[in-house]
Structure formats: structure tokens, C-alpha cells
Image: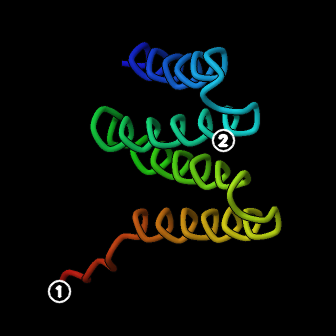
Amino acid sequence: MRTGFGLGLLLCVLIPLALLLFSVVSLEQTASLMLLLGGLWAVVFGVAFAAAKDKLYDVGVGVIVAVLSTFSVLPLQYTAGLVVVSIIGVVVFSMMGRSKPPQQRMR
């Protein structure tokens, strides 16, 4: 199924590149659009197609990459802050997903 992920990422690069060549978007907007589409594709792939053990990782990386795309809209320090908050969120969700309830002793 990794072929589908790579194919989706290829489209996430080629679509903004085509828009740049047709002068629809600027170079900065192209880079931002590539990051946004790549991040969204990683989230969709993680939710819909990834193996159970990879879901959280794929979605987490997708969110972080999508947040990185805000550099063209927000000031750089806000983008960096959002990335840090996203990483913290991914770590917290990762820890919550792996925690197991305590086992009761048998009497």
C-alpha cells in the first residue's frame, strides 16, 4: 500500500508545480501548497489506508507538515509555535494511545 502513499505525494508536488508554471501562484505559495497538500494527504492516508500500528504516526506527521505550510500566511514565529504545539499534541496522543489500563490481580 506504500505505492499509493508515494503516488499521492507525487500528485501533491506536481499539482502546485503545474500551477506555478501557469503563473497561478507564486514560488512561496507553491512551496506552501506542496506542504499543505502533502500534510493533508498524509492525514487522509493515515486515517483511511495505513496499517493500525502506523496510523498515529502518519496522521501526526501529516498534521505537522500541514501546519508548516502556514509560513506563507502567518509570521514565522507563529508558524514555529504552531509546529511546537503540534509536536506536543502528537506526543500526548501517542502516549495516550499506548497506555494500557492496569491489570487486576487474580485472587
**Corner quadrant of residue 85:** bottom right
Q: Nearer the viewer, mark 2 or mark 1?
A: 2
The residue beneath circle 2 is 32
Circle 1: element type:
loop
Q: Residue furthest left?
A: 107
**Residue 35: x percent and y percent?**
62, 39
The label shown at residue 45 is: none
Q: CA distance from mark 2 to mark 1?
A: 60 Å
Question: Is 63 located above or below residue 8 in the figure?
Answer: below
**Most foreground residue, 105 or 102:** 102
CB within 8 Å, label 2 to label 1: no
- In which quadrant of the rendered image does the C terminus lie? bottom left
For label 1, count other residues whose C-alpha is less than 10 Å away and answer few (under 14), some (14-19) or many (20+): few
Picture quarter with the N terminus: top left
Q: Identify the residue under disc 1.
A: 107
Q: Nearer the viewer, residue 100 or 42?
A: 42
Write the residue at 68% across / 39% down: 29
**On the picture, is 80 further left or further right than 93?**
right
* Residue, far right: 77
Image location (x, y in percent) of residue 14: 56, 16
Label 1 is placed on what type of residue? Arg
Relative to 14, residue 71 above or below: below
Q: Is residue 71 above or below residue 81?
A: above
Which quadrant of the structure image shows residue 34? top right
* Residue at x 44%, y 35% (from the top left corner): 41
**Residue placed farthest to the bottom in the image?**
107
> What kind of residue is marked 2?
Ser
